[in-house]
Amino acid sequence: PRVARGGLVVRCSQEAGGAGAGARALLELAERARAGEAAAERPGIFEIVGAVGQLIRVPGDLGDAIEAALAEQIDAVVVERDEAAIEVLELLREQEAGFATIYPLDSLAASPPLNLRNERGVIGVAARLVRTERAYRPLIDALLGRTIVVEDLATARRMLQRGLGSVVTRDGTLLRPNGSLFGGRGGAAAEQFSLRRELDELPERLEQAREEVEGARARLKRQDDVVADAHARVESARRAIEGSEQERRDVDSERESLARRFAPVAAELRSARAVLLQPDPAPSGAPEGDRLAEAESLVESVGAELATLRDRSQALVSERDRALERVTGSEAQVARLEGELRGLEERREQRAEAERRARALLAGRREQLRAATSEREDLAVRLADLARRLEAAREQLSEASARVGPARSALAEVEAEAREVTARRSETQALQLESERGLIEAEARVRRHQEAVQGWLEQIADEGMTVDEHGSVRAPLPEGVEPPPRSEFDEAPAGDAGERTEQRLEPGPEPAAAPEEAPAPSGAPGLPPLRGGREVDTQELRGRVTELRSRIRSLGPVNVEALGELEEERQRVEFLSGQLRDLESTERELRGAIGELRRLIRRRFTETFAEVNAAFSEYFTRFFGGGHAELRLERPAAAEDGAEEEHGAAGEENGEEPPAAGEADPGVEITAQPPGKRITSLAMLSGGERSMTSVALLFALLSVNPAPVVVLDEVDAALDEANVERFVETLRELTARSQFIVVTHNRRTIEDADAIYGISMGDDSVSRVLSLNLEELPAAG
């Protein structure tokens, strides 16, 4: 059972080797490549050592603390060389297996852990509390060398104020120098540490169990031998008892036989004695004396034999008693041995039951580890999906931002074109309405004129007159009378008639109602008077006709395709209106995205500003030994309120959250008050105080958002020795997360550097670079 338990622990430890998808993929590839199950695509796979969490051994009560101290670094993959790290990262990108943190052992910078005094509530430095192999010690010192393990949160806050590094409590709450807290309970890493510790202890426990089993088997064999010997002795004693009983029965039988034989002899002896005791004056003779002597001899021999039998019987009884005592002792010893045997059997059953419970517990933990691993895989997949979606959203936002300018220009052009089309449509509609009104009025006038002409024709016919082809009214002449010559007014020009048929009539004043009777036209001299005729003013009619013709000519040519063009323009307007609605919808979406991005930027800026402000105040107080410093946001002038209100109204119309006042281009004001001074303006401080304030702000920014490489040029030039000492101590603390290149002439700063590079110029005016690695000096010396 212990061997099976060991196998289960090994498998569980392998399955709990890491939660990151990329790290797990690399570890599985390395395991398969070493086992020969799959060909290694990159030689660097064979240089994978394992995950950081697999390289350390943690005490049983510090699993949560070390898990929180390592945080996301617990799943980082360790390789032997930097080239192997590049190869495995390229393999991850090719297979799209996820992300992973890689630590090459050959390029790690030495980072000695902290040295702490024994204090109440302080357990120690995390790097010194875990065990690992010598080759991995620099990595563990770099990761845990500046993390202090304490008992409770109060002690953690007290130690954090010293600025030595991060502090973690026993229950797994991590406090970082930047003010952030990390904690919770994952369980997988702590369970992994427990399983690995059990795996390490398993060989020793297995050997102890084997020794105990061998000893128990030896004791059991000895007890079996003793029991067998006791059983043999009991059997021998029983056989001896049975033999003694048989001898006793034989002796009793022989004694009874002798008693039967002795009874007549005794009777005869008694009778003989009685005879002898009687007075006999005369001896009876020699035969009686012989018989008496013979009887006495027989009595003596029988008595001696009885005494011998009595002695033998007593000896047999004594031997039987001793045999019974031996049997009783043997039975007691057998009972005791059987009790010990039952005890051993019970202990063996208890051990077997404990093994079964342990295996069941281990199986349950294995299932928990599998569930935790599956959950972490799902979370990793979801995180990757969210990252991809975020990246896609950012790309869409960038594309949308890039399209906002052209879209707005196109929108302006479309709006201008739409306004022009609307104006043209309004003009066309007005012209159409005016034309329709004119047409209706002209048709009404034509109908009225036709009715009037028809009435005139009927009256002329009633009077017996006729109308010729030129429209002249003529009366029948008497016989023999010649018709008068035609006047110039009797003929209507053909051109005018053609124009009348080709031009549209404009609405004009209706002709006055004709009187019932009119004189004969003045232009028809010589005609006989018309009876019942109407007087017609031809001059007025000609003037009216001329006016109507001029008004018709002023209309110009009529566009017969105006209705088709109107329909085309209407379709064009509908198409442009649809595009305008799409652009407005896109603009609202973009403004919403811009508003969301603005809110996110505002929140991140506020959080980062608060962290930087707290760190700046802490570093300022540390550098100056007191005092107060603060960062404040400057609001824009009130003159910009109108523009902001206009922008806010436009944003609200399009669904975009208007920016708060002063958030467009906020400024930062630095107030610094050294201890013992009442001034708060930087301009009133000395050069050294301004330099220390600037350094405090720089270190605050680096502590909140550390940079990989930082170059400082003559930062300590205006500092005195005490401030240089504080500057160097703080700079040394920040080297755990950033690499600093300091240009300085200060001896104290140079003494604390890891490597020194000097630039000199020789007589040949050629610059030379001199380098010195201070860490190599003790080894070289």
Image (cartoon, rainbow, N blue to C red):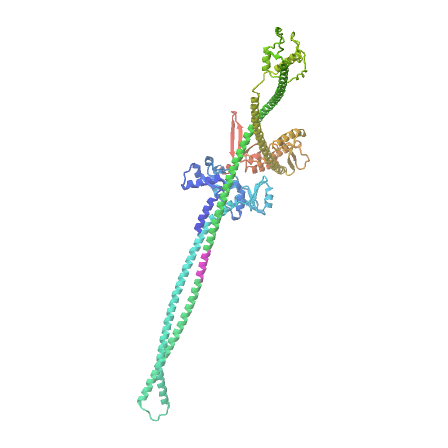
Determine which quarter of the picture holds residue 34: top left
The residue at 41%/60% (across/down) is 222
Is any atom of residue 440 visible in this view? yes
Residue closest to the eye, 513 or 380: 513
Q: Main secondary structure of the magenta part?
A: helix
Q: Is residue 719 left or right of residue 366?
A: right
Q: x, y (%) of residue 475?
A: 63, 10
Looking at the image, residue 639 lies above or below residue 68: above
Which residue is at 45% across, 48% downward? 8
Position above or below: 427 against 400:
above
Residue 344 is a magenta residue: yes
Front residue (pair 711, 434): 434
Q: Which quarter of the picture shows residue 685?
A: top right
Total marks placed? 0
Measured as percent of width and height from the top left, residue 461 is found at 62, 14
Left or right, 365 with reference to 612:
left
Q: Magenta stretch: residue 606 in it?
A: no
Highlighted magenta segment, given as a residue range: 339-350
Residue 246: horizontal and vertical position, in percent?
36, 73
Relative to 350, residue 713 above or below = above
Residue at the limit of the structure toward the bottom, as seen here: 281
**Whether residue 745 can be seen here:** no
Q: Nearer the viewer, residue 326 or 450?
A: 450
Residue at the far front: name it.
479
Q: Position of residue 739 (x, y in %)?
A: 54, 35
